[in-house]
Image (cartoon, rainbow, N blue to C red):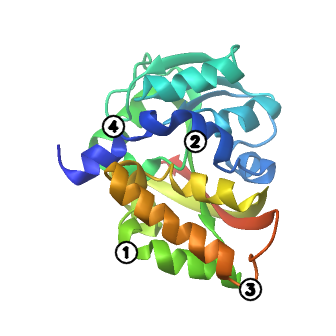
Amino acid sequence: MDGWAERRTSFGSVAADYAALRPGYPGDAVAFLLGDRPRRVLDLGAGTGLLTEVLLAAGHEVVAVDRAEPMLDQLRARLPQVVTATGGAEAIPLPSGDVDAVVAGQAAHWFEPVPAAAELRRVLRPGGVIGFLWNTRDERVPWVRALGELLAAEARDHEADQSVVDRFAAALPATVQTFGSGTVQQLPPEQVVAGIGTRSYVATMDDAGRSRFLDRVRALLATHPDTAGRARVELPYVTRAYRLTPR
């Protein structure tokens, strides 16, 4: 298994921490993607249901699909009313024309654009939309920037960027509209460390390497002037939402 494939399938090993420690998604970003009328929505790469939860709160009917059964187990425990299925973007386990929208939170960079685009078009009803969201740490904040610099060598090629959306827009093809929002987590420093442990590039390290790496994160939080001695810290995120409308 190559490194990208190993990382894409690594999340089951950290499912419980992922559910507890990853940030959710702001409601205004979901409203931008889907509008204000209820829709039948596929949450693709749904993981533990962080985006699913926001979709339900907005009144949508949700089908959740993910590759990792341990992640879906977390979702089922928290949101038992949601229909779930195991599968990936390149072979979506739904019938054709089944949903009004497909959304993916923190997941589209793991999809292969050409086969996934064909599947997205297949499962969408006429007039359907596709929404991609990513939370990224807000490195305008000094301690968060220092954290990003510490993580950068290991996180290379991990975070999504405009090129992911561009590849899907070309493959579908689709027009793209964008929206910015944000969210903030308030966490004890040790939960910040544990949250970094749910990142794919950390989850795939051997035990000794992971321990050394997380100790460096722990040391930064203990010594940076903005976080040293704090019982809780604020970890801000920028949320970027992309609505793709197939042509």
Distance from disc 4 to disc 3, alpha carbons, whole Å, reads: 50 Å
Above or below, 168 relative to 138: above
Can residue 127 be seen by looking at this rendering?
yes
Number of the front mark, 4 or 2:
2
Ranked by sequence position, the earlier of labels 4 and 3 is: 4
Binning the other alpha carbons within 10 Å of mark 4 as few (below 14), some (14 to 19) or many (20 upward) gives some
Residue occupying the point 43% across, 16% down: 95
Label 3, on which residue?
225
Mark 1–mark 4 CB contact (< 8 Å): no
Residue occupying the point 31% across, 51% down: 206
Q: Which mark is on residue 18?
A: 2
Which three-letter amino acid code belongs to the residue tagged 1?
Answer: Ala
Number of the front mark, 4 or 3:
3
Residue 194's x, y, as percent? 59, 52
Ranked by sequence position, the earlier of labels 3 and 2 is: 2
Mark 3–mark 1 CB contact (< 8 Å): no
Ranked by sequence position, the earlier of labels 3 and 1 is: 1
Label 1, on which residue?
153
Q: Which mark is on residue 118?
A: 4
Judged from the image, the secondary structure of the residue bearing numbered disc 1 is helix
